[in-house]
Amino acid sequence: MSIKIKQAKAEDSAFLAQMILQSSRAGKKDGLFDLLFATNDNKIILQRLEELTQTTAKSHCHFSNFLIAELDGKSIGTLCSYEPRISNRESFIKALTEIGFTDESEALEVMYICDFHLNNRTLVLDFMEELEGFRDVGVLKALMQKSLLTARLKGYRIAQTMIEIGSLESELFYKKMGFTTIEQKECALYKEKFGRIGMSLMSIEF
């Protein structure tokens, strides 16, 4: 059995939605999209996320930003990589507008309150997830290696990711891949909504 890495397509949107929701919750009762769509109903959130991956506006949730890991033809993991000059707050708001979402004030404030100033020459990684039952088969490592190789061919030399402070498993994985923590932000509003004190920015040169 070998892991195959492929570029995501529009028809992968249902799986991408599942992985985006799993990533946003990260062990919490509520994640960003529960807050954004004002519901804990998985069916509703997953439907909205599917729509969000296919908008004309290329937000960080757009399917074209994703790699998918497959094993025996089954999708088992994802990794998103995007350019902050293209997939930014403005494109995300445009994408939300496309799917008919308008009341984003508080949710977006929470989303961006712990944000970092990102260099437009840096590639940003997000939504690194794998299905339960595939934790020890090298899914995330394969996705990361493919993503960084592709980024290098595009001329990138620095990749960064943002994780919640206290996400020890994610932090350990990124450190094993060569990332280092370069900045942290503690945010009272983020802690109030999600029970996590803030975000860490991790970076790698490759």
Image (cartoon, rainbow, N blue to C red):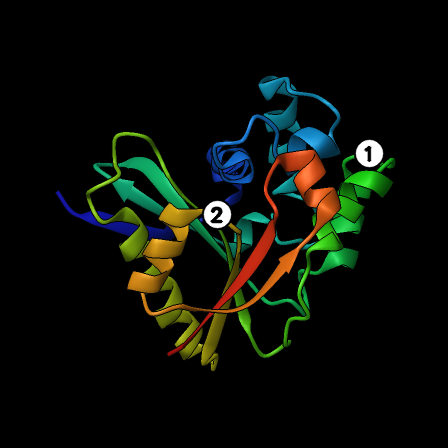
Please name the residue shown 26% across and 39% down the image.
Answer: 135
Vertical relation: 188 (above or below) 205: above
In the rendered view, tell whether residue 88 sits above or below residue 194.
below
Callout 2: SS: loop
Q: Residue furthest left?
A: 1
Q: CA distance from mark 1 to mark 2?
A: 34 Å
Q: Is residue 43 left or right of residue 98?
A: left
- Which dot marks residue 166? 2
* Quadrant where the N terminus is found in the figure: top left
The residue that appears at 71% across and 31% down in the rendered structure is: 35
- All told, the count of numbered labels is 2
Q: Amino acid at mark 1?
A: Gly
The residue beneath circle 1 is: 100
Q: Classify mark 2: residues with Cα within 10 Å, few (<14), some (14-19) or many (20+).
A: few
The foreground one among 87 and 6 is 87
From the viewer's side, name the closer residue of 18 and 164: 164
Residue 162 spot, x, y in % from top left: 54, 57
Nearer the observer, disc 1 or disc 2? 2
Earlier in the chain: of badge 1 and badge 2, it is 1
Q: Is residue 182 visible?
A: yes
Q: Could you say which quadrant of the image residue 17 lies in?
A: top right
* Residue 51 seen in render: no
